[in-house]
Image (tube, rainbow, N blue to C red):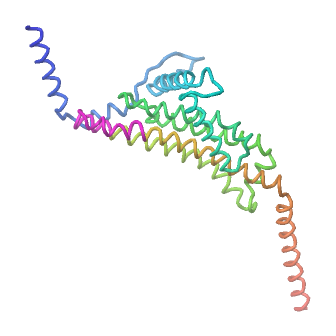
Amino acid sequence: MSWLAEFFRSFGRHFVDEFKIGNIGEEINEGILQWKRDFFDLGGIKVVLTDAVIVSWIAIAIVVLIFALMSRKAKIIPSGKQTFVEMIVELIIGTSMSFGMNRKEAEHVAPMIGTIGMIIMGCNVISAFKIAPPAKNIAFPVAMAVVAIIYVIYASIRFVGLKGFWLSLTTPMKALLPFKVLDMIIKPCSLALRLFGNVFGAFVFMEFLFIIVPVIIPGLFGLWFDIADGILQAVVFSYLTMSYIGEIVEVGHEYEEHPENFEKKKKEKKSKKNVTNNDNKEISISEV
C-alpha cells in the first residue's frame, strides 16, 4: 500500500499548493501574454503563429462539426436538433427583416451572419475549458470587425445598388456625408473594442479567481463569464452587423418605393433658394 500512501501524500501537497497565493501579478501576466513563435518564412516575411490563431482554428473546426452534425439528414418532419437549427435560422431572418430587409435579402445575409455569430461564440465559449479565448488578442476582434463592415458595404450595395448606398450617406442632407463616412469607420472600431473589452475583462477576472479560490467558485462564475457572456457577445456582434445593413437598405428601399419623396426634398431646397434670392433682390431694389 506504499504507492497508495505516496499518491495521497502527493495529492494533498498539490491540493494545498492550489490554495497558496503567489505573485498574482506575474500569474495573471502569464495568462494575458500571447504565446507565439515564428512558424515559417513566406517570401522573406516571417509568418507568426500565436495561440489566438491555433485556438481559433480549433474552435471553428469544433463549431462547424457540431452544426454539420445537427443539420445533416434534414427531414420534412424535423427532429429536435433540426428544429433547433431552423429556429436559429428563422430568428436571424426575422431579425434582419425587422431592420428593413425583405425576405429574400434576409435569407441572403442569414448564412454570413450565422457564420460570424458561430465563430465568435465558439472562440469565446472555449475559455470554459481553461483555454485562453482568441478575443483577448486585439487582432482577433479587429479582424472580425473588418470582415463584418466589408460585408455590410458589399451586401448593402448588392441589395440597393450604388445609388441607394449613396443616398444612405446623404440622407437627410448632403452636409452629413463626412459624418456618415466617419460613422462607417467608427462602427468596426466599436465592434472590435466591445468584443475585446468584454472578453479580455472576463478572462482576467476568471484568471484572478482561479488564483485566489481555485475550487468550485471559478466554475460557478465561469457559467456566466465563460459561457453566457461569450454567447451574449456573439449575439450582440451579429445583431449590430444586421442593424448596420438594415440602416442602409431601408433608405434604398424607401427611394425605390417612393422616389417622389426625395424629388420633393430637392424641389423644396431649390424653391427655398429661389425665394431667398428673390427676397435679396427686392431688398437691394428697395435700398436703391
Q: Is 86 on the left-hand or right-hand side of 259?
A: left
At horizontal 64% and vertical 52% (from top left) the residue drawn is: 182
Q: Is 288 on the left-hand or right-hand side of 122?
A: right
Residue 88 locus on image (x, y percent): 58, 37
The answer to which image quadrant residue 92 occupies is: top right
At horizontal 81% and vertical 55% (from top left) the residue drawn is: 255
Residue 171 locus on image (x, y percent): 74, 59
Q: Main secondary structure of the magenta part?
A: helix
Along the viewing direction, whichever of 268 and 35 lies nearer the viewer? 268
Q: Is 200 on the left-hand or right-hand side of 288?
A: left
Q: Quadrant of the C terminus?
A: bottom right
Along the viewing direction, whichever of 158 and 184 lies nearer the viewer? 158
- The question of residue 67 being in magenta is answered with no
Magenta residue span? 206-228
Residue 189 locus on image (x, y percent): 55, 46
At horizontal 58% and vertical 17% (from top left) the residue drawn is: 42
The answer to which image quadrant residue 20 occupies is: top left
Residue 180 locus on image (x, y percent): 67, 54
Q: Is 194 on the left-hand or right-hand side of 155?
A: left
Q: Is residue 52 above or below residue 142?
A: above
Along the viewing direction, whichever of 75 and 61 lies nearer the viewer? 75
- The question of residue 210 being in magenta is answered with yes
